[in-house]
Image: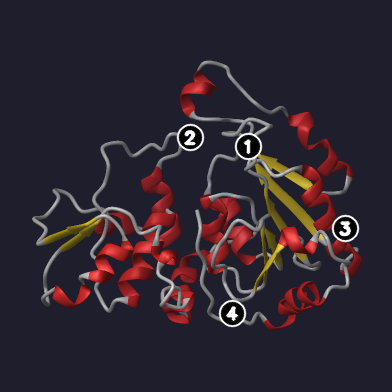
Amino acid sequence: MKNIIDGMATAYKNKMNFGGTVPVGNIVTEHGHNFRTLADGFFGAGATESLFIKPSPEFAKKYNNVPELEQHRDELKPGQMVFMASANGWAEIRESQPSDYYSKEVVELLQGPIWSRPLPFFDGRRPSVALHLRRGDLKPDDARATKNEYYYTLLDHIKHHWPEADVHAWSSLNSYSAEVEAGKFHWKTEDFDGFRERGVTVHLDGLSLLEPWVHMARADVFIMSVSSFSFVPATLNPHCVIYCGNLDRPFSHWINGLVQVKQKAESEPLNKCLARRATGDAAAGGAGGG
């Protein structure tokens, strides 16, 4: 999904029409989710009918990535069909500002369908905090499986300001489908007991990926993991987003969690981030990294 919305943002920046994506052969992801159903929920009912192009058209030009496309942008003629294999590398282009891609207009368009969906898990009367804990597809010693203590410290800082916060964490015990079928798991539910002891409601392996995205995108605070899955709702969240220090070019209103855990709860960046709950100020920013 990240590659798709990155492609849309790249098309906007380069004043091109986003014509859709060339689908791969399977519609079920390596984690066992029906991607077409997910895309219809994310972009709106029936979106996949126009989003996925089949059969593949004849392309006038093909590019591997965003820097290559932008290098030849002036050579393209109006109406030409262009294929770009990956849109994930747009942050490598240092001459552009991140908001040139994820502008306020692009973000608001992407928010539309997500904002129309219910939020069944949030209390509604209390500040909401959503965490994405990347676990299932990683072994515990993988650097991308950010340690629990990092999240505990951030939660302590947030609860210093909002002791009544309604905190939910989404994660998975399941790895790739092949490993699940073989009965191979790297994590167990007891690995999340530290969160439960801190009053966090833990959601594991839900039937739909859309449900966590809706809550993460609209939470008063969203604490990301090192994951493209986190990036998708983070782009839509107009409030306080905390990233795990792995992004070269985060949105302008996101704050670096690796820096925050070394500071006090009353740090200026966190104070400003939490203050966005009242304003919902969706200042256009930008992001990078995978």
Helix, strand or loop for disc 3: helix
Point 28% across, 58% down: residue:
51
Q: Which residue is mark 3?
A: 156
Point 27% across, 42% down: residue:
24
Crowding near the residue tagged with mark 4, few <14, some 14–19, many ≥20 C-alpha atoms within 10 Å: some
Q: Earlier in the sequence, mark 3 or mark 1?
A: 3
**Mark drawn on residue 282:** 4
Q: Is residue 290 left or right of residue 169?
A: left
Find the distance from the CA under tag 1 to the CA under tag 2: 10 Å
Residue 64 in the image: state x and y as whole percent.
Answer: 26, 55
Q: Earlier in the sequence, mark 1 or mark 2?
A: 2
Helix, strand or loop for disc 2: loop
Crowding near the residue tagged with mark 1, few <14, some 14–19, many ≥20 C-alpha atoms within 10 Å: some
Question: Vertically, is 113 above or below 22?
Answer: below
Q: Earlier in the sequence, mark 3 or mark 2?
A: 2
Q: Earlier in the sequence, mark 1 or mark 4?
A: 1
Q: Which of the 4 image quadrants contains residue 95?
A: bottom left
Q: Which residue is mark 1?
A: 172
